[in-house]
Amino acid sequence: MKTALVLGIMETVDKWGESIQEFLRQHGRNPILWMAFFGIGLLIFFSTYNALQKEK
Protein backbone atom coordinates (compact mmCIF):
# COMPACT_ATOMS: atom_id res chain seq x y z
CA MET A 1 0.00 0.00 0.00
CA LYS A 2 2.80 2.45 0.87
CA THR A 3 4.55 1.59 -2.38
CA ALA A 4 1.49 2.59 -4.41
CA LEU A 5 1.26 5.87 -2.49
CA VAL A 6 4.92 6.65 -3.10
CA LEU A 7 4.60 5.79 -6.79
CA GLY A 8 1.54 8.02 -7.06
CA ILE A 9 3.42 10.90 -5.49
CA MET A 10 6.40 10.31 -7.78
CA GLU A 11 4.15 10.31 -10.85
CA THR A 12 2.51 13.55 -9.74
CA VAL A 13 5.87 15.22 -9.18
CA ASP A 14 7.04 13.95 -12.58
CA LYS A 15 3.97 15.45 -14.28
CA TRP A 16 4.54 18.77 -12.52
CA GLY A 17 8.18 18.71 -13.62
CA GLU A 18 7.18 18.14 -17.22
CA SER A 19 4.68 21.01 -17.00
CA ILE A 20 7.34 23.33 -15.60
CA GLN A 21 9.85 22.28 -18.27
CA GLU A 22 7.32 22.96 -21.02
CA PHE A 23 6.48 26.37 -19.52
CA LEU A 24 10.17 27.30 -19.37
CA ARG A 25 10.71 26.14 -22.95
CA GLN A 26 7.89 28.40 -24.12
CA HIS A 27 8.73 31.44 -21.97
CA GLY A 28 12.45 31.00 -21.36
CA ARG A 29 13.46 34.07 -23.33
CA ASN A 30 11.26 36.43 -21.32
CA PRO A 31 13.57 38.58 -19.16
CA ILE A 32 10.75 39.56 -16.80
CA LEU A 33 10.30 35.88 -15.90
CA TRP A 34 13.97 35.56 -14.95
CA MET A 35 13.89 38.81 -12.96
CA ALA A 36 10.86 37.45 -11.08
CA PHE A 37 12.68 34.16 -10.36
CA PHE A 38 15.70 36.11 -9.13
CA GLY A 39 13.53 38.36 -6.94
CA ILE A 40 11.70 35.39 -5.44
CA GLY A 41 15.04 33.71 -4.76
CA LEU A 42 16.33 36.82 -2.98
CA LEU A 43 13.13 37.05 -0.94
CA ILE A 44 13.48 33.42 0.18
CA PHE A 45 17.18 33.90 0.95
CA PHE A 46 16.71 37.04 3.06
CA SER A 47 13.68 35.72 4.92
CA THR A 48 15.59 32.53 5.78
CA TYR A 49 18.68 34.51 6.75
CA ASN A 50 16.67 36.79 9.03
CA ALA A 51 14.91 33.83 10.65
CA LEU A 52 18.26 32.18 11.38
CA GLN A 53 19.74 35.40 12.78
CA LYS A 54 16.89 35.76 15.28
CA GLU A 55 17.94 32.51 16.94
CA LYS A 56 21.36 33.90 17.92
Image (cartoon, rainbow, N blue to C red):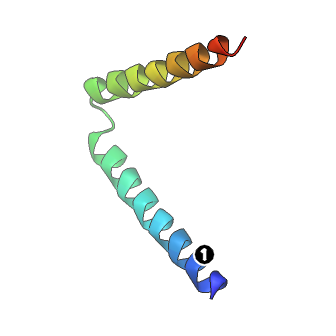
Residue drawn at x 33%, y 25% as measured from the top left: 36
**10 Å crowding of disc 1: few (<14), some (14-19), many (20+):** few
Question: Is residue 28 toward the left or the right of residue 8 in the image?
Answer: left
Is residue 41 placed above or below 11 in the rendered structure?
above
Q: Nearer the viewer, residue 53 or 8?
A: 53
- Whole-percent x, y for residue 18 in the image: 42, 60
Q: Nearer the viewer, residue 16 or 29?
A: 16
> From this viewpoint, which residue is outermost toward the bottom?
1
Q: Secondary structure at mark 1?
A: helix
Question: Is residue 22 toward the left or the right of residue 42 in the image?
Answer: left
- Whole-percent x, y for residue 7 in the image: 58, 78
Q: Where does the N terminus fall, quadrant-wise?
A: bottom right
Question: Is residue 38 toward the left or the right of residue 32 in the image?
Answer: right
Disc 1 marks a residue whose amino acid type is Val
- Whole-percent x, y for residue 22 in the image: 34, 54
Label 1 belongs to which residue? 6
